Image (cartoon, grey):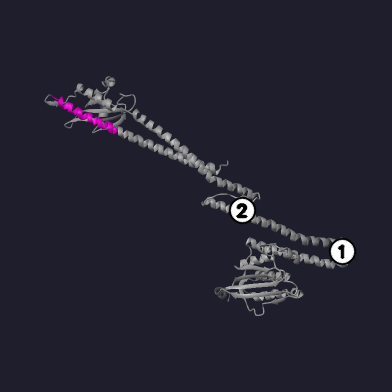
């Protein structure tokens, strides 16, 4: 069964609050009961002691000599009014018994008849210096009473006992009235706590619900959703991260769609050409004497497809992180010369002038030989394509500040300023480049930027329309530690 974060959090906090109130109520009930009981004990024992002292005085005054011994008499007539007065004053019943526990006096006239058949011997035996208990006084009362007892002593001789009892109902009445006040206050506090917890829970859960709704839209391909959470806490950080993720996903999705569209276009064009010419040769539309010329076109298109697939594999390896570089000490000048020699026929065909390498010596770097050769090939190939016939290509290799710099500048139409930000994007081809380069796929400069980045370097471009285009990159120069390790 689904349980929302709101219900779980609200229920948990509510249970904690209710449990806290119950524990606090129980503790207060116990402590308050103990406090009232203790107050009652002190009151009854103080009064019992006071009555015992008064009784001792009257007994001394009523002493007689019997059989050669002093006998202390309890003046019932003189004590009865005093006991009634004291009983009314403290709302208690006062009993005076002899040393054997037989009741002699009772402050309550209604209970006096019952006391004649009553013996408190079990209680008086427990008195000692004092006694406090809850008892019915051997059945004298229907309900338990608080009872405090003290001995009546004259010259260390116990002549009787004073027992003062008070109904426990007074305690429960006091406790009940206080408990009602407490419960009303507690219920008000609980209600306020529930309201605060509800609002707080809603405040905490609302961003989570917004995030859940946003992620559902992301799953459906809609990356325009945003989570609006203010603050500087963890929730706002999570919302910001989710919004940034949405931006990244949107960018990735746009790149994916563009990628699929470009790949589809790049694959469709040569495949359509190949299929058309092959079908024409098979059905006889293309006569046998013209077939070699069209077979050459088919061969060129197959090579174009091969280059596209190879570039796609390189991109896949780069994007997935599976591209493993084999770093070696290589001479960038030697690699550049190899690329220029391989492009010699194209250079001569367009009557291009190559300058800048006349005094270039050995320029070593630490890098992947194949990848760096591909970077040089892409940049030189790009320069040859877009240099005007009879134009110039200037190539420089320098070393400064712990870096090796490569710069290639070609004359020609240049790159429009509005197209400069997209020049290194995959499959990007300007209208001018599409007109001049029918076989290009728009992956060369993207691969250049990626490979240079893998070598911890940077590539830049400058261009002035109608004058020149210049690509440049730098990579770290070899360190002495690496040089010694390679040597």
Whole-percent x and y of residue 327? Answer: 61, 70
What secondary structure is found at the residue carrying circle 1?
Answer: loop
Residue ID for mark 2: 246
> What residue does disc 1 label?
286
Q: Nearer the viewer, residue 451 or 160?
A: 451
- From what the image shows, is residue 1 above or below residue 169? below
Q: Mark 2 against mark 1, which lies toward the viewer?
A: 2
Image coordinates of residue 212 in percent, x first then y, are 59, 47
Q: Quadrant of the N terminus?
A: top right
Instruction: Give the residue at x 37% y 36%.
Output: 30
**Over which residues does the magenta segment extend?**
41-64
Q: Is residue 121 rendered magenta in the image?
A: no
Question: Please, which residue is most extreme toward the left here?
Answer: 68
Residue 148 vs residue 350, the one in the foreground: 350
Q: Is residue 438 visible?
A: no
Based on the picture, tell me whether residue 54 belongs to the magenta stretch: yes
Question: Which class describes the residues within 10 Å of circle 1: few (<14), some (14-19), or many (20+)?
Answer: some
Give the number of marks: 2
State the quadrant of the C terminus.
bottom right
Residue 427 pos. (x, y %): 70, 62
Image quarter for residue 447?
Answer: bottom right
Whether residue 82 appears in this view of the structure is yes
Q: Mark 1 and mark 2 in contact (Cβ < 8 Å)?
A: no
* Quarter-of-image position of residue 336: bottom right
Q: Secondary structure at mark 2?
A: helix
């Amino acid at each position: 069964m689904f349980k929302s974060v709101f219900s779980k959090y609200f229920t948990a906090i509510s249970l904690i609050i209710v449990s806290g109130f119950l524990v606090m109520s129980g503790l207060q009930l116990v402590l308050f009961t103990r406090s009232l009981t203790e107050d009652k004990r002190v009151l009854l024992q103080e009064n019992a002691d006071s009555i015992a002292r008064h009784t001792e005085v009257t007994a001394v005054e009523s002493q007689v000599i019997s059989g050669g011994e002093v006998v202390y008499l309890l003046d019932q007539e003189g004590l009865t009014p005093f006991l009634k007065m004291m009983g009314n004053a403290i709302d208690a019943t006062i009993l005076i018994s002899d040393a054997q526990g037989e009741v002699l006096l009772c402050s309550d006239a209604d209970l006096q008849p019952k006391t004649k058949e009553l013996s408190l011997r079990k209680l008086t035996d427990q008195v000692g210096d004092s006694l406090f208990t809850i008892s019915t006084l051997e059945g004298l009362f229907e309900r338990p009473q608080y009872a405090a007892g003290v001995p009546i002593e004259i010259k260390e001789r116990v002549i009787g006992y004073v027992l003062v009892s008070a109904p426990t109902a007074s305690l429960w009445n006091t406790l009940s009235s206080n408990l009602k006040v407490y419960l009303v206050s507690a219920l008000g506090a609980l209600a306020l706590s529930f309201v605060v917890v509800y609002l707080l829970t809603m405040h905490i859960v609302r961003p989570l619900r917004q995030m859940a709704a946003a992620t559902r839209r992301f799953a459906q391909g809609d990356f325009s959703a945003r989570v609006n959470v203010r603050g500087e806490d963890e929730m706002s950080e999570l919302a910001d991260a989710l919004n940034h993720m949405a931006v990244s996903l949107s960018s990735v999705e746009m790149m994916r769609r563009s990628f699929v569209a470009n790949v589809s276009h790049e694959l469709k064009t040569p495949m359509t050409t190949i299929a058309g010419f092959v079908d024409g040769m098979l059905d006889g539309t293309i006569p046998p004497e013209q077939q070699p010329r069209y077979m050459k076109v088919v061969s060129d298109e197959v090579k174009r497809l091969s280059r596209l697939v190879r570039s796609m594999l390189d991109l896949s390896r780069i994007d997935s992180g599976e591209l493993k570089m084999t770093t070696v000490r290589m001479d960038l000048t030697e690699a550049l010369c190899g690329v220029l020699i391989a492009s010699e026929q194209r250079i001569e065909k367009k009557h291009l002038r190559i300058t800048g390498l006349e005094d270039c010596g050995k320029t070593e770097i630490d890098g992947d030989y194949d990848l760096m050769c591909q970077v040089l090939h892409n940049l030189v190939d790009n320069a040859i394509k877009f240099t005007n016939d009879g134009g110039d290509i200037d190539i420089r290799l320098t070393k400064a500040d712990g870096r090796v710099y490569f710069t290639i500048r070609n004359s020609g139409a240049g790159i429009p300023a509005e197209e400069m930000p997209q020049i290194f994007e995959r499959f990007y081809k300007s209208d001018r480049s599409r007109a001049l380069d029918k076989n290009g796929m728009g992956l060369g400069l993207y691969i250049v930027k990626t490979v240079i980045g893998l070598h911890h370097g940077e590539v830049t471009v400058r261009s002035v329309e109608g004058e020149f285009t210049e690509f440049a990159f730098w990579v770290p120069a070899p360190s002495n530690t690496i040089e010694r390790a390679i040597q």
